[in-house]
């Protein structure tokens, strides 16, 4: 593509532009980016070097003395392409981030992405010195023995989790982590990986089983302060909440005994339809079900489920839509997998039969080489823009987060 130049780093991470070289991108196949796939790097984007990885150039060349550059996108954007590179033999494994292709165009940094949502509740909040710590201390002083509230303080401070921070900021969707156990062993789990995984998890999983009363007190307080707020079981710092169905039932009962406003939501892998049905009976109003693929082999290769399979997940989606819940899919997207023709067509067939309220695209945070090694490269990628447009043409809302109204 004419006019697109190479953006790269040196070994120290300093960024340089070379507009005389044209970089390749990786969309499952290595190719030149298309102009409509590129936007100026948005506010909040973070540049990152890919150590031990050399940028690929048009014409088959490799920028051998240069280090590949990637960009991590802020919330509300969906990536369209990956950086294309050649890996040196001694290159380390990449940490669990969402790597997006970057280049230079008209002397500006551009990325392969599209804007898919916006919400003030998911906009980064920049705290003054000591401001966040003061909020955490003040709120915890009101409920000092609440272990879940203490966990949310850790998630707010150490991991910058928006839904955890919302508990203390009294806005939007508030986190209610509940389960230390999981029935999947996701290759890119952000809270717990096996010791031989070759990389650390970016977070530490909650180590205790949350008490129903602790959860209810957090939720009641949130709904008192945020009339149209959302309280959500199932967060990134935990395992699978459906494994704690009795505790969640009790918490919902206590919440609704005090507050009738707001929305009670569950984030889940959808593995246990019968448990989900119990929560719907208890008063659950919305559910966000996570999956990386509607193809059984691709789903199993990433999630590595125990005691369930993709059929159970699809049954949970169908159950929730049939029972009238607001159903969102937490769709873990990855160029070259999400936009494979077989994936797009399988997704389309399912959504025509079970129309959900929203497909929320989530960048799958993983080393692209590791993911392709697990699930395979595509035979016929349509391109991420086309895949997203086909979802919209089904009449399904496309976004990145749950809105309160």
Image (tube, grey):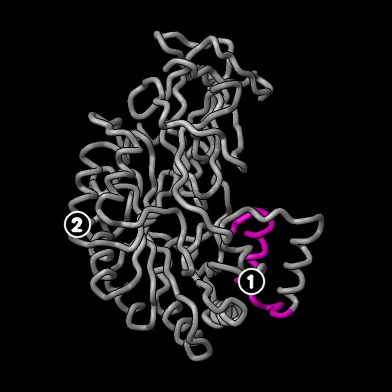
Question: On screen, 148 above or below 38?
Answer: below
On the image, numbered disc 2 is attached to which residue? 352
Quadrant assignment for the N terminus: top left
Q: State whether residue 166 appears in this view.
A: yes
Q: Main secondary structure of the magenta part?
A: helix
Residue 139 lies, in percent from the top left, at 71, 74
User: Magenta span covers which residues?
Assistant: 142-162
**How many other residues sit within 10 Å of disc 1, few (<14), some (14-19) or many (≥20)?**
some
On the image, numbered disc 1 is attached to which residue? 170
Residue 122: quadrant of the picture:
bottom right
**How many other residues sit within 10 Å of disc 2, few (<14), some (14-19) or many (≥20)?**
few
Q: Is residue 144 magenta?
A: yes
Between 46 and 205, the one lying in front of the other is 46
Between 216 and 260, the one lying in front of the other is 260
Question: On screen, 57 above or below 276?
Answer: above
The residue sitting at 48% across, 11% down in the picture is 62
């Amino acid at each position: 593509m004419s006019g697109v130049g190479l953006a790269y780093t040196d070994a120290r991470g300093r960024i340089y532009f070379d507009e005389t070289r044209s970089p390749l991108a990786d969309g499952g196949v290595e190719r030149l980016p298309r102009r409509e796939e590129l936007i100026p790097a948005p506010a909040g984007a973070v540049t990152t070097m890919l150590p031990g990885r050399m940028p690929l150039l048009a014409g088959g060349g490799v920028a051998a003395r240069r280090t590949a550059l990637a960009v991590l996108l802020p919330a509300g954007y969906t990536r369209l392409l990956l950086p294309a590179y050649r890996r040196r033999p001694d290159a380390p494994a990449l940490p669990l981030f969402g790597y997006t292709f970057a280049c230079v165009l008209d002397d500006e940094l551009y990325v392969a992405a599209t804007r898919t949502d916006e919400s003030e509740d998911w906009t980064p909040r920049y705290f003054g010195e000591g401001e966040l710590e003061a909020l955490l201390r003040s709120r915890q002083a009101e409920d000092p023995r609440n272990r879940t509230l203490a966990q949310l303080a850790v998630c707010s401070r150490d991991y910058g989790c928006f839904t955890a921070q919302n508990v203390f900021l009294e806005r939007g969707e508030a986190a209610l982590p509940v389960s230390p156990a999981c029935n999947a062993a996701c290759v890119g789990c952000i809270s717990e990986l096996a010791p031989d995984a070759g990389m650390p998890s970016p977070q530490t999983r909650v180590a205790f089983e949350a008490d129903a009363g602790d959860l209810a007190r957090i939720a009641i307080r949130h709904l008192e302060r945020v009339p149209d707020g959302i309280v959500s079981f199932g967060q990134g710092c935990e395992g699978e909440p459906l494994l704690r169905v009795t505790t969640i039932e009790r918490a919902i009962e206590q919440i609704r005994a005090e507050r009738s406003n707001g929305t009670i939501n569950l984030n889940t892998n959808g593995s246990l339809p019968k448990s989900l049905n119990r929560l719907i009976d208890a008063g659950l109003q919305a559910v966000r079900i996570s999956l990386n693929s509607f193809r059984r082999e691709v789903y199993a290769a990433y999630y590595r489920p125990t005691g369930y399979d993709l059929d159970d997940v699809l049954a949970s989606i169908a159950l929730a839509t049939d029972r009238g819940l607001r159903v969102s899919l937490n769709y873990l997207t990855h160029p070259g997998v999400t936009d494979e023709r077989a994936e797009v067509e399988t997704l389309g067939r399912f959504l025509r039969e079970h129309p959900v309220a929203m497909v929320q695209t989530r960048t799958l945070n993983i080393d692209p080489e590791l993911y392709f090694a697990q699930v395979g490269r595509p035979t016929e990628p349509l391109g991420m823009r086309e895949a997203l447009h086909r979802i919209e043409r089904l009449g399904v809302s496309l976004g990145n987060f749950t809105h309160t109204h």
